[in-house]
Image (cartoon, helix red, strand yellow):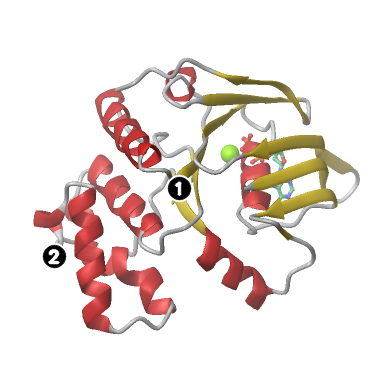
């Protein structure tokens, strides 16, 4: 599903170059549930953003579902993102003036799916995350955990090959974290490939494979005995 070989990324910080990723090698198969851990500033988001075609590598190989991801223009990058990827962020990134239903339906709007079908499918996904009765509510009427469920429904509605989640539980308390990780486990058990960036070992323990980034390389990469919730 995902092949990364000797991938490098630096940022230009004016005076000097900050070499963040120094030769990453990572293969992820369809259906895996992977966590990427590392201390703050270790390059987790940088790697996830490259995987998500939100940012570009400097060198190395990145193939997504057999397609080499190289120097895409913004139109092509957006096309690949909407075709292959679903995103979940720490801060939910919901649109405040749109209802839960409309937030979930939004990716289909960009795919020119007619309104009636959009809303039907959005309702299905809201049901899937247990929020059907909240469809007409605005984000500020929802709890943090509910907002993240809406974001997860939105990430799934295009049936992406891979779901990318950057610190999805970073803004949640421990009970809600547990519930969200349980939802991601359920989604993975249905076959969806999921990559979660986290700095919380408890969260990583709820995935099936843990990759640890340190000093720009992968320090360890192990399949783990997942704590099933
Ligand atoms: P993490 O997600 O593990 O906390 P990041 O990938 O966000 O780490 O950042 C890795 C390093 O790269 C940090 O030192 C950060 O300050 C730096 N960095 C991230 N994005 C940029 C950018 N757009 N420009 C310059 N430096 C950046
Ligand atoms: Mg980060």
Image x and y of residue 90, in percent = 43, 43
Image x and y of residue 46, in percent = 67, 44
Taking the spot 25% from the left edge, 57% from the top edge, the residue there is 125
Which quadrant does ligand 2 occupy?
Answer: top right
Total number of numbered discs in the rendering? 2
Q: Which mark is residue 136?
A: 2
Task: Determine whether the beta carbon of the residue marked 1 sits less than 8 angstroms from the nearest atom of ligand 2.
Answer: no
Above or below for 149 versus 41: below
Image x and y of residue 32, in percent = 52, 36
Q: Nearer the viewer, residue 33 or 43?
A: 33
Image quarter of residue 100: bottom left
User: On the picture, is 29 further left or further right than 138?
Assistant: right
- Earlier in the chain: of badge 1 and badge 2, it is 1
Taking the spot 51% from the left edge, 31% from the top edge, the residue there is 198
SS of the residue under disc 2 = loop
Image quarter of residue 222: top right
User: On the picture, is 204 further left or further right than 39?
Assistant: left
Q: Nearer the viewer, residue 186 or 23?
A: 186
Do residues under tags 1 and 2 come within 8 Å of each other at their CB atoms? no
Gap between marks 1 and 2, in whole Å?
A: 22 Å
SS of the residue under disc 1 = strand
Q: Nearer the viewer, residue 63 or 11?
A: 63
Dot 2 crowding, Cα within 10 Å, few <14, some 14–19, many 20+:
few
Above or below for 33 versus 99: above
Q: Is residue 186 visible?
A: yes
Taking the spot 30% from the left edge, 65% from the top edge, the residue there is 103
Q: Which mark is residue 89?
A: 1
């Amino acid at each position: 599903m995902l092949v990364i070989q000797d991938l490098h990324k630096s940022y230009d910080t004016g005076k000097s170059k900050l070499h963040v990723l120094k030769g990453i090698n990572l293969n992820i198969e369809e259906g895996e549930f992977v966590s990427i851990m590392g201390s703050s500033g270790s390059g987790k988001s940088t790697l996830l953003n490259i995987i998500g075609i939100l940012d570009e590598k400097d060198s190395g190989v990145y193939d997504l579902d057999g397609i080499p991801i190289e120097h895409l223009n913004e139109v092509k990058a957006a096309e690949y993102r909407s075709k292959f990827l679903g995103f979940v962020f720490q801060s939910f990134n919901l649109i405040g003036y749109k209802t839960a239903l409309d937030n979930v339906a939004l990716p289909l709007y960009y795919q020119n799916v007619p309104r009636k079908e959009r809303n039907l499918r959005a309702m299905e996904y809201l049901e899937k995350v247990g929020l059907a009765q909240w469809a007409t509510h605005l984000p500020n009427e929802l709890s943090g955990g509910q907002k993240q469920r809406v974001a997860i429904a939105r990430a799934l509605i295009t049936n992406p090959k891979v779901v990318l989640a950057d610190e999805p539980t970073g803004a949640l308390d421990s009970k809600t974290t547990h519930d969200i990780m349980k939802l991601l486990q359920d989604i993975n058990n249905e076959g969806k490939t999921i990559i979660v960036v986290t700095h919380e070992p408890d969260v990583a323990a709820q995935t099936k494979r843990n990759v640890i980034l340190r000093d720009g390389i992968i320090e360890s990469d192990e399949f783990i005995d997942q704590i099933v919730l």
